Image (cartoon, helix red, strand yellow):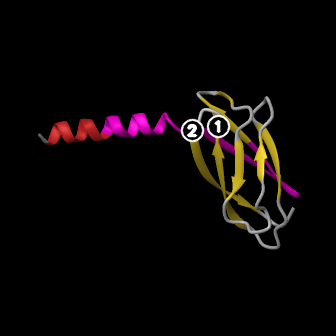
Amino acid sequence: MFNFKVIAASAVLVISSSAFADIRVTDTHNGAWVTVMENGKPAANAEVTVANVPQSRGTYTTDERGRVFVPLTLENSRSIKYKAKTESGKESSRFAFHSSNK
């Protein structure tokens, strides 16, 4: 019975992890380039939001290469949470550290 529970839990983790989009963040002087991938391909028209920066409340949409620039005005270095939702409804989030000293 224990082996069955381990196998079932492993299967759930594999299936649930494949349902997420992949987010990559490149920090720049005045914001970040965010790339959203789905099944290894760029996710065009994905909606990207920033969860924990009050100054950046907008929703940004990726281009045909799955990229979008998110402007950020930070006074201090901090970790920022990005959320993405693809056209097919897959959601993902990721924290990325941004330095205020560039």
Q: Residue at x 78, y 73 (%)?
A: 76
* Position of residue 83 measured from the top left corner of the image (x, y, whole percent): 64, 51
Query: In the rendered image, which residue does mark 2 sit on?
Result: 90
Q: Is residue 32 magenta?
A: yes
Q: Residues within 10 Å of mark 2 (few under 14, many from 20)?
A: some
* Mark sitting on residue 50: none
Q: Are marks 1 and 2 in contact (CB under 8 Å)?
A: yes
Dot 1 falls on a residue whose secondary structure is: loop
Query: In the rendered image, which residue does mark 1 sit on?
Result: 86
Residue extent of the magenta highlight: 10-34
What's the distance in space between the residues labelled 1 and 2, CA to CA?
A: 5 Å
- Residue type pointed to by label 1: Thr
Q: Residue at x 58, y 43 (%)?
A: 91
* Position of residue 22 measured from the top left corner of the image (x, y, whole percent): 61, 39
Residue 41, located in which quarter of the rendered image? top right
* Position of residue 77 measured from the top left corner of the image (x, y, whole percent): 75, 68
